[in-house]
Image: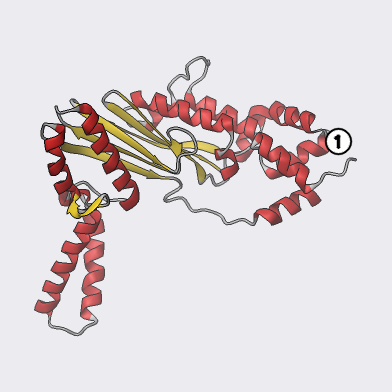
Amino acid sequence: MADITASMVKELREKTGAGMMDCKGALVETSGDMEAAIDWLRTKGLAKAAKKSGRIAAEGLVGAVTSGTTGALVEVNSETDFVARNADFQTMVGTVAKLALDSDGDLELLLGTQVPGADKAVKEHVAELVGTIGENMNVRRVATISVEKGVVAAYVHNQIMPGLGKIGVLVGLESTGDQQKLAELGKQIAMHIAATSPLALTREEVDPEVAEREKAVLIAEARESGRPENIIEKMVEGRMRKFFEEVVLLSQAFVMNPDHTVEAAIKNAEASVGAPVKIVGFVRYSLGEGIAKEESDFAAEVAAAAKG
């Protein structure tokens, strides 16, 4: 039996994006032949996919794409960041994002959409890649925004490929004005959203449960001061006003010019655009938000795989 080293396992993983133990197993089966090990991993195909489905997939990529007056945002998860750097995975996410333009934000519809040039739907296409790469992955969520007249701007923070990264934003602007100027404004607002993560467009759209929970916390804090209830009421009222200023997009200080709110910045931009501008909606995806992640020691994982 060939001596399988940690560096060999790491090299195979980087070439294929397959799981650490799968790479070790492939090298053992092929007596350390790197090319044969790659082929061995590929021949496992869908037989491996079911075994991966229970693993936590909290890494991956967010993909954003726009076409005309429509934009789409998708999050496709994998188990490790290695896979996010895999060219096949990146191509798949880009393909899914483009197909999402016609999904109307419906995940099941997207998963059932046929992949161009392939006799399979998105769901089967992803499952096939699971078998090839050797890690659990899934299309977690999708959103679309459309406008009648105007633009849908997209921004991906720290993108590793055009339209692919860890944070993605769509924002829809309705206006009959100069489309290029409108697109520039949309890009700035999308960047602002990526940085500030607002909860809603307007105060009325903030989830009532979130607002009530915040209010309850502020009341409890204020009562610790021992002040009368009428004073506490005024204190909480002021703090809730500050809360909404911080979480409502239109009320936030615009990151490009903190002296103005986003609402004021849009109003100021109307002179350049040449017509009134209205934000009709926005979506912000941050990779893995809401998913419980498992911490791992990569060095220890490599050593364990090399020792068998």
Percent position of residue 186, x then y: 26, 37
Instruction: Find residue 252 and report its horizontal and vertical position in percent.
Output: 22, 54
Query: Residue at (51%, 19%) from the top-left corner?
Result: 120
- Asked whether, in this view, residue 72 is left or right of residue 117, the answer is left
Q: Residue at x 71, y 31 (%)?
A: 41
Instruction: Tell me if mark 1 has few (under 14), some (14-19) or many (20+) residues whose alpha carbon lies within 10 angstroms of its own.
Output: some
Foreground of the two, 208 or 73: 73
Task: State whether residue 308 appears in this view.
Answer: no
Question: At which x and y percent is residue 225?
Answer: 22, 83
Image quadrant in which the N terminus is located? top right
Hey, which quadrant is residue 180 in on the image? top left
Using residue 146 as the reference point, say whether residue 7 is left or right of it. Answer: right
Element under disc 1 = loop
Residue in view at x 68 percent, y 35 percent: 15
The amino acid sitting under disc 1 is Ser
Residue drawn at point x = 21 percent, y = 66 percent: 215
Q: Nearer the viewer, residue 180 or 8?
A: 180
The percent coordinates of residue 174 (x first, y second) are 17, 32
